[in-house]
Amino acid sequence: MDKIISIIIPTYNMEDYIARNLHSLVISHHLDAIEVLVINDGSKDRSSEIAHQFSNQYPQSFKVIDKQNGNYGSCINVGLQYATGKYVKILDADDYFETANFDTMVGILKDIDVDLVITHFAFTSPSGKTETTRNLHLPSGKILSIDAIAHTKSIQGLWMHEIAYRRENVIKMGYHQEEGISYTDVQWGFDPMSTVRTVYFINLLVYHYLVGREGQTMDKEVYIRKFGDEFTCTAAMLRTFNNAPMASEAVKNMMFSKIKGRIIALYKRALVEHNDYENQAMIAFDQQLKEQSPHLYKSIDRKLLSVPLFCYPYIHIWRKNRKSKMLQFVILAYRKYKH
């Protein structure tokens, strides 16, 4: 049977979570229509063993690919080589799907033909407490033109967890995720958007995103240590923005807004949250931004720290003088005000 959707699951030392993850994909009505690809990234625990138990039990739908460790992006790249579904979606090994809603989603996918499918996700604690999903303000149950909604915050702010793409689009554009580093999931929410012309929103919670797990990449200590990876990922996204053919001018403008917002957020995180004025990854990226995307470089130059109390162009001042005492004073005052 042709597969409607491929689910790629990057997996490294997830023996405590992978069983729940895979159980959530054992749907009642459309199991034969899905393809689950567990990409075991050289795990040293029982992750592969547990995943193989599922592939043995459900060989028509579950497959395990064991590979040497290459980090998250390498798992996505390998998964795309094996995927055969019409659509493709990523599910992290410590997260899981809302099973009944995923089953409904697959049934809907059988009857539509679009480039991008959007569903809800929710933050879920280790205890199982789930937050309310955010309102995407999109019409559900109908095929939409990306040009009609590309200007909305809903589309510009999409998370990886909300997205499934037409696989053919991803393959044709030569999508490649950065390897050997963290936070590359942001590329999945950005690069293939350049190919999107049609969108379908299913108003269901499908993805549970686990937060608060000790050692995960969004843990504060881990994140600070790996913060430079954010700029490596953003540099890759910048290359896509500069070089990939865009489906339309509206998509180009949407992607400009997405990457601009991301860059501003990273600069603010480094300077305000981390108090890091000499971050070498950011300095190198800023020079690259100036050379490769002067329009984007200029567009963030006069960004204000906060309106109306801190109308201070902190990025502009940082670029002129990273040792500026006034910059440090204003950021300190802002930080005290926010807390």
Image (spheres, grey):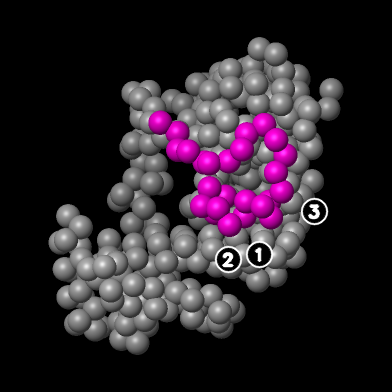
Compared with 260, 108 (above or below) is: above
The image quadrant of residue 215 is: top left
In the rendered structure, are the residues bearing label 2 and label 1 in contact, judged by CB atoms less than 8 Å apart?
yes
Q: Looking at the rendering, in which quadrant would you find the N terminus?
A: top right
Q: Is residue 136 magenta?
A: yes
> How dense is the environment of label 1, judged by Cα within 10 Å: few (below 14), some, or many (20 and up)?
some
Residue 194's spot in the image, x, y percent? 69, 58
Residue 280's spot in the image, x, y percent? 39, 74
Circle 1 sits in a helix, a strand or a loop, which is it? Answer: helix
For badge 1, the amino acid type reads Lys
Distance between mark 2 and mark 1 Cα atoms: 6 Å
* Residue under label 3: 172
Circle 3 sits in a helix, a strand or a loop, which is it? Answer: helix
The stretch in magenta equals 132-156
Residue drawn at (48%, 38%) of the image: 135
Single out the residue that lies furthest toward the right. 1
Residue drawn at (20%, 66%) of the image: 334
For badge 3, the amino acid type reads Lys
For badge 2, the amino acid type reads Phe
Q: Nearer the viewer, mark 2 or mark 3?
A: 2
Residue drawn at (18%, 69%) of the image: 332
Distance between mark 2 and mark 3 Cα atoms: 22 Å
* Residue under label 2: 256
* Residue under label 1: 252
* In-image side of 121 versus 292 (left or right): left
